[in-house]
Image: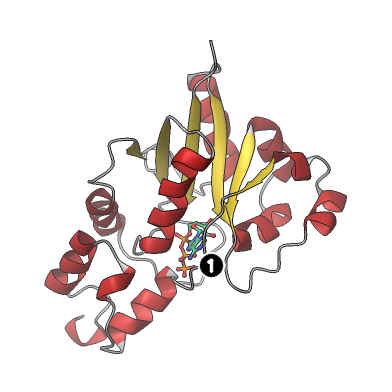
Amino acid sequence: MTPSMTGIFGGTFDPPHLGHLILASESLWQLGLDRLLWVLTPDPPHKPSQPITPLALRLEMLRLALSDEPRFEICDIEIDRPGPHYTVDTLRQLRAADPSRELVYLMGGDSLRDLPNWREPAEILRLCHKLGVMRRPYDEVDLDALERVLPGIREKVRMVEVPLLQVSSSQVRQRVAAGQSFRYYLHPKVYDYIVQSGLYRPDLD
Ligand code: ATP
């Protein structure tokens, strides 16, 4: 029997945008995933100086963003664990919960470039069957350089083939704050939620 392939997609999702959804949905079929767990990080260790939207609101936006695809699931493993939240601990916990499944960790090219600075990157590689990577504009991915610091990474990386998408959560937050249009960067339900809640609008704080 072929082992089940479970994708893991960690992020701050403040807010979840179409770049996240396209990476996730392309990965389902390009990498042959059975399901994809979205791991919402309560307090990301790599974004200490950035004010982050309260967890309950990010969770609600993520719930709305994922509502059309039954293979997408929110995973509350980090929410239930005291911080700081490191990916390596999440992967260990998921592997221990079901050692038979293969874990595929999804990330953008910017995260891949930073991976050597994450906690225990070699252990992250060991715990993952593959890393599914979608390139991002300006991500400067250099697999030769990464292989020198993290031997074995090249054979784990699978590129998810999609057009480069110049959309980020910070850009969406800035567009909302500046009163610029932002509807088509987001799932329609996330767009409606942001408009109705006044989130990211400094004038409504
Ligand atoms: P911010 O702009 O606030 O830093 P973000 O848009 O990078 O946020 P995160 O929630 O931090 O969103 O990202 C989670 C994961 O999604 C990361 O691995 C990131 O590289 C990836 N990602 C986000 N946007 C894109 C995109 N447009 N193309 C490819 N990968 C992306």
Seen in the picture, residue 178 relative to 46 is either above or below; the reply is below
Task: Provide residue 203's location: percent of width, then percent of height.
Answer: 21, 87
Outermost left residue: 196
Q: Is residue 86 visible?
A: no
Crowding near the residue tagged with mark 1, few <14, some 14–19, many ≥20 C-alpha atoms within 10 Å: few
Residue in the foreground of this view, choosing between 47 and 179:
179
Residue 169 occupies quadrant? bottom left
Q: In this view, does 58 lie to the left or right of 135?
A: left
Q: Which residue is drawn at 46% across and 39% down?
A: 29
Q: What element carries label 1?
A: loop
Q: According to the image, label 1 marks what residue?
A: 164
Residue occupying the far right of the picture: 148
At label 1, the amino acid type is Leu
Q: Does the closest atom of ligand 1 sit within 8 Å of the Cβ of label 1?
A: yes
Q: In this view, does 107 lie to the left or right of 42?
A: right
Which corner quadrant of the image does residue 193 belong to? Answer: bottom left
